[in-house]
Image (cartoon, coloured by chain):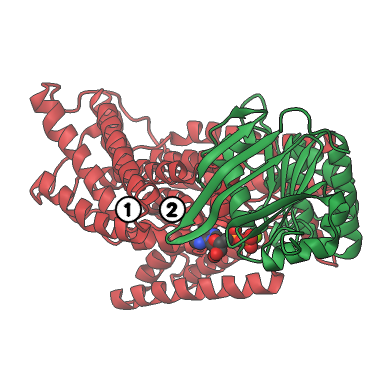
């Protein structure tokens, strides 16, 4: 069981984001405790990606973000990284023309004492982390455009876990993966959770949310339907929240 | 040496000896085309094309466009374009011409050909070029006006700012020391050219060796020793061969006599001296080396390529792509000034039409050199080679006696053809 007696690792309070007239995220509040996995569920276009992009610094919204109970300003991706927030984006956000190593270290290159990028040292690190995540991976010298969907995904995952994240955001991390690789990501999530990392997991598959998450927040049309403890609900409860936009039991009452 | 910035090939099933050398196949293709071109012209001109004299001239004619093409690589790699470089060259040239012929000698009482004039002039020019470039970059990066529009406007603005500054007059003759940067009037001489050649060779071999050592230290596969040796030999031969050719172009004896007279000496009987490497070529070499290091070994360079490959990904990785745009255009402006120095010094004057059509030559050189307009791909050495190919084509046709209109028709067709070949090649290797 996750200990929720202390201060939450992350609190997002009353977050709203609008694109033109579209309220992509409408007064949503979610939180996350250390060692916890919180699932974000909802239809396509519900606003899940937009919500987590506020936390990762890609979008600006209104509302408040607290880390360890302290308000923080996250106005760009650098701020998020400085707060140990790492993100695996749905689009992966890889520079297709660069190789895996350059993508892994993009924005945080290792440099030699002379200030030049140290490709050999970075490649050695990249080989280490990829060896853990995807032992079959060998294409270190090719642009990532030459990689398969699963390989690209593993590069994006490596980038998020390499830098000692405390808060990890995973936006549909298994979308491009086969069953075996999906299982590996599930194991990775358990491992990271055991290290006390807090994870926001966006996933389409209700079953894997039931399996991996401690709580789930469901969104519909930009609004938060509700947050439930996974042990208290069934697959069907979650599905009806997603589809009907109502809390379980609300209809029974 | 597979590198994010090199257009590396995916490993193919059959690893032949060429692949063991880990050379850029595209570069080899370009060098091959260039060599064929030169040999062809040499045959058609009864051996007049590949003489030391003509190679020397070809080299100094290429420098101005090649310097700007190096900067254009970064501009195009970040998915922008700069149509204003020829006009910006004119403005920088005009500013420097006024500085060295009016402001410094008369308004500030330096007198003519003061030893500090050329250096102050160049610093003023570099400052102006960089500021103008940065300003255009600001409009593009922060105000998000497309680069095409900003630099199309810049094309008109700077061409006519140059005109306004000089009243449309040809300004000259330029400062004596300044003119030494144009080409034939300022060369290293044989001895220093050899020194330069040896230093460059040692540096090249050292870089090859240390990057091999760095890979070996981490236990990676390195290319076999023989391949390393062959590669080193090719580099050394290319550098020293180039120096030998430029040294082989001898200063005419009349001119040599006058040089001795100017120094109050008498020329020894039967003395011959080669020109050696021109200072302008030295500037190009320095620019190409520095920018290659920037592209491959600095964060700035890595971010340029990342931004070109996927601007959103770069932004999400915390790269300030707007600031990057300003820096790239500021660098372009800086290089336009360097080209303006070389171009005006070569002509010994600032003329109102200096740099006309250069924007097109510069873009063509970068593109022939393998820079993809879709962004993310390109090399500095490719752009220099592209500029050299264009210049060889132009001068070769002039020597063969091709009519002027046909020269431009051919150059235009070659540009389109080069891009077509590039597209087909990339499809074939799946890059
Ligand atoms: N950059 C954007 N510009 C305009 N509208 C956007 C943008 N990003 C997302 N939206 C809109 O916001 C809404 C939520 O999208 P998103 O957060 O991607 O949903 P989800 O991840 O839940 O599928 C959708 O209506 C989408 O069209
Ligand atoms: Mg989404």
User: On what subunit does the disc labeled 2 rest?
Assistant: B
Q: Which residue is drawn at 74% across and 56% down?
A: A142
Circle 2 residue: B72
Q: How crowded is mark 1: few (under 14 residues within 10 Å), some or many (20 or more)?
A: many
The residue that appears at 51% across and 55% down in the rendered structure is B77
Q: Splitting the image into four quadrants, where does ligand 1 fall?
A: bottom right
Quadrant assignment, res A50: bottom right
Mark 2 nearby-residue class (10 Å; few <14, some 14–19, many ≥20): many
Q: Is residue B138 visible?
A: yes
Distance of mark 1 from mark 2, alpha carbons? 9 Å
Q: Can residue B274 be seen in this view?
A: no
Chain assigned red: B
Q: In terms of secondary structure, where does tag 2 sit?
A: helix
Query: Residue at horizontal 65%, vertical 28%?
Result: A69
Q: Do the residues labelled 1 and 2 touch (CB within 8 Å)?
A: yes
From the rendered image, report the letter of the chain displayed in green.
Answer: A
In depth, the one of B127 and B222 nearer the eye is B127
């Amino acid at each position: 069981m996750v200990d929720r007696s202390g201060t939450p690792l992350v609190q997002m309070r009353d977050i709203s984001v609008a694109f033109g007239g579209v309220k992509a995220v409408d007064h949503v509040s979610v939180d996350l405790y250390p060692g916890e996995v919180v699932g974000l569920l909802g239809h396509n276009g519900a606003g899940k990606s937009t919500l987590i992009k506020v936390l990762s610094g890609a979008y600006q919204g209104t509302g408040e973000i607290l880390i360890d109970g302290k308000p923080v300003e996250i106005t760009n991706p650098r701020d998020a990284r400085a707060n140990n927030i790492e993100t695996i984006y749905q689009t992966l956000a890889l520079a297709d023309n660069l190789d895996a190593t350059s993508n892994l270290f993009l924005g945080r290159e290792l440099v030699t004492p002379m200030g030049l990028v140290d490709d050999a040292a970075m490649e050695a690190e990249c080989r280490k982390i990829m060896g853990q995540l995807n032992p079959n991976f060998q294409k270190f010298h090719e642009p990532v455009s030459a990689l398969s969907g699963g390989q690209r995904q593993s590069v994006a995952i490596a980038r998020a876990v390499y830098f000692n994240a405390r808060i990890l955001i995973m936006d549909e991390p298994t979308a491009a993966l086969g069953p075996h690789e999906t299982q590996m990501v599930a194991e990775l999530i358990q491992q990271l959770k055991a290290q006390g990392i807090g994870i926001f997991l966006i996933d389409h598959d209700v079953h894997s949310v039931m399996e991996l998450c401690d709580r789930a927040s469901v969104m519909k049309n930009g609004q938060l339907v509700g947050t439930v403890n996974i042990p208290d609900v069934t697959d069907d409860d979650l599905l009806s929240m997603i589809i009907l936009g109502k809390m379980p039991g609300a209809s029974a009452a | 040496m597979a590198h994010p910035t090199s257009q590396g090939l995916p490993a193919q099933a059959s690893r032949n000896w060429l692949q063991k050398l880990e050379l850029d196949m595209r570069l080899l293709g370009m060098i091959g085309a260039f060599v064929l071109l030169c040999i062809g012209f040499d045959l058609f001109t009864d051996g007049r094309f590949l003489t030391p004299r003509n190679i020397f001239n070809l080299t100094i004619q290429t420098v101005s466009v090649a310097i700007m093409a190096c900067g254009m690589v970064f501009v195009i790699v970040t998915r922008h374009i700069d149509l204003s470089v020829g006009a910006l060259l004119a403005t920088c040239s005009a500013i420097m011409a006024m500085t060295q012929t009016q402001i410094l000698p008369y308004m500030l009482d330096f007198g003519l050909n003061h030893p500090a004039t050329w250096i102050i002039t160049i610093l003023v020019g570099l400052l102006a070029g960089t500021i103008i470039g940065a300003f255009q970059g600001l409009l593009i990066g922060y105000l998000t006006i497309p680069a095409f529009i900003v630099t199309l406007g810049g094309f008109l603005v700077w061409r006519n700012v140059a005109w306004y500054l000089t009243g449309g007059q040809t300004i000259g003759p330029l400062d004596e020391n300044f003119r030494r940067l144009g080409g034939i009037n300022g060369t290293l001489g044989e001895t220093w050219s050899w020194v330069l050649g040896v230093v460059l060779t040692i540096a090249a071999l050292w870089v090859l060796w240390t990057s091999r050592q760095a890979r070996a230290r981490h236990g990676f596969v390195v290319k076999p020793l023989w391949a390393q040796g062959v590669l080193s030999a090719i580099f050394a031969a290319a550098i020293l061969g180039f120096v030998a050719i430029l040294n082989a172009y001898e200063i005419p004896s009349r001119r040599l006599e006058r040089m001795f007279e100017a120094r109050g000496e008498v020329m020894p009987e039967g003395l011959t001296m080669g020109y050696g490497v021109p200072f302008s070529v030295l500037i190009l070499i320095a620019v190409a080396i520095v920018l290659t290091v920037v592209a491959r070994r600095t964060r700035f360079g890595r971010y340029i390529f990342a931004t070109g490959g996927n601007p959103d990904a770069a932004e999400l990785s915390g790269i300030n792509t707007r600031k990057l745009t300003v820096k790239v255009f500021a660098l372009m402006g800086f290089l336009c000034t360097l080209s303006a120095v070389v171009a005006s010094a070569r002509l010994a004057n600032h003329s109102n039409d200096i740099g006309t059509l250069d924007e097109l030559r510069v873009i063509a050189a970068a593109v022939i050199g393998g820079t993809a307009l879709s962004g993310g791909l390109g090399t500095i050495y490719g752009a220099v080679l592209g500029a050299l190919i264009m210049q060889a084509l132009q001068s070769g046709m002039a020597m063969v006696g091709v009519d002027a209109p046909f020269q431009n028709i051919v150059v235009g067709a070659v540009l389109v053809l080069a891009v077509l070949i590039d597209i087909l090649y990339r499809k074939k290797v799946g890059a």
